[in-house]
Image (spheres, rainbow, N blue to C red):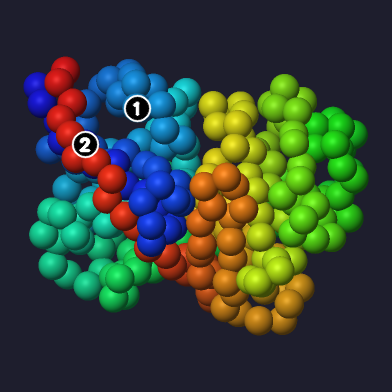
Amino acid sequence: MKLKLYQIDAFTDRMFGGNPAAVVPLESWLADSTLQAIAEENNLSETAFFVPTGEGFQLRWFTPVREVDLCGHATLATAHALFELLGYAKPVMRFDTRSGPLFVEKQGERFAMDFPADPPAPCAMIETLVRGLGQQPLALLAAADYMAVFDSEATVRAIRPDQTLLAQLDRRGVIITAPGDEVDFVSRVFAPKYGIPEDPVTGAAHCALAPYWAERLGKHTLEARQVSQRGGEITCTVREDRVMLAGSAVLYLVGDIHI
């Protein structure tokens, strides 16, 4: 069996920036063990697999170690592959996922994704998290991930986490965030228990970041930057219980998988 593979840098307009994701089109679902093995072999933070349906596509995402419920950058990469490489002609595409239906709209050179909001709630400080980050946050909140809020972009950039300690926490990962110097807010994301020590750009994390910063800054549309080594940019628009995440993507590689 031969499968097509597209590797796409998401949330960036330049190659070697943003977050690389693999996208594998399928005619029907393979065994979960095969999907996981492909994701492990790719060794990217996410590999996306999709199957056409009557209304759109079923979409699933795998890290090198497990399947996840939601992934923004691999959804953006999949939309880029469908719109730009595989001839999808409608203005909006629908993905059915473990997080419910997701919609992606082509907006010129960018793609806008309609995702469920995941507003975080304040929680008590956790000593393991503080030691894992090496810094005391100004505040700690929790949604799917823990969100540690700091005073400045410089502080967020300077943190060197202890991944072993962060892997002991009971959430998907840890987001660190602060006001940005040139954008509304910046962030970094660590998910060692998912096989991702630091994710370059994380759409799912912005489902929590955007509601928090929208309320704090009193605005519904925000410009965000994830300040990982590769870096990436996301425009976030909060609409009640949904978050629109808009960004660009760049094709890096087209190849074949032989199984």
Provide the secondary structure element on which disc 1 rests.
Answer: helix
Q: Which mark is residue 213?
A: none
Query: Which kind of residue does numbered mark 2 sit on?
Result: Leu
- Quarter of the image for the N terminus: give it: top left
Residue found at x 34% / y 27%: 42
| Residue neighbourhood size for the residue with mark 1, other residues' Cα within 10 Å, grouped as few (<14), some (14–19), many (≥20) | some
Residue found at x 61% / y 27%: 193
Residue found at x 27% / y 50%: 251
Give percent across and percent down for residue 91: 22, 72
Looking at the image, is 183 positioned above or below residue 115?
below
| Residue neighbourhood size for the residue with mark 2, other residues' Cα within 10 Å, grouped as few (<14), some (14–19), many (≥20) | many
Residue found at x 80% / y 37%: 133
* Residue 119 showing in the rendered view: no
Pointers 1 and 2 in contact (C-beta within 8 Å): yes
Give percent across and percent down for residue 215: 72, 74
Q: Which mark is residue 42?
A: 1
Mark found first going from the N terminus, 1 or 2: 2
Query: Which kind of residue does numbered mark 1 sit on?
Result: Asn
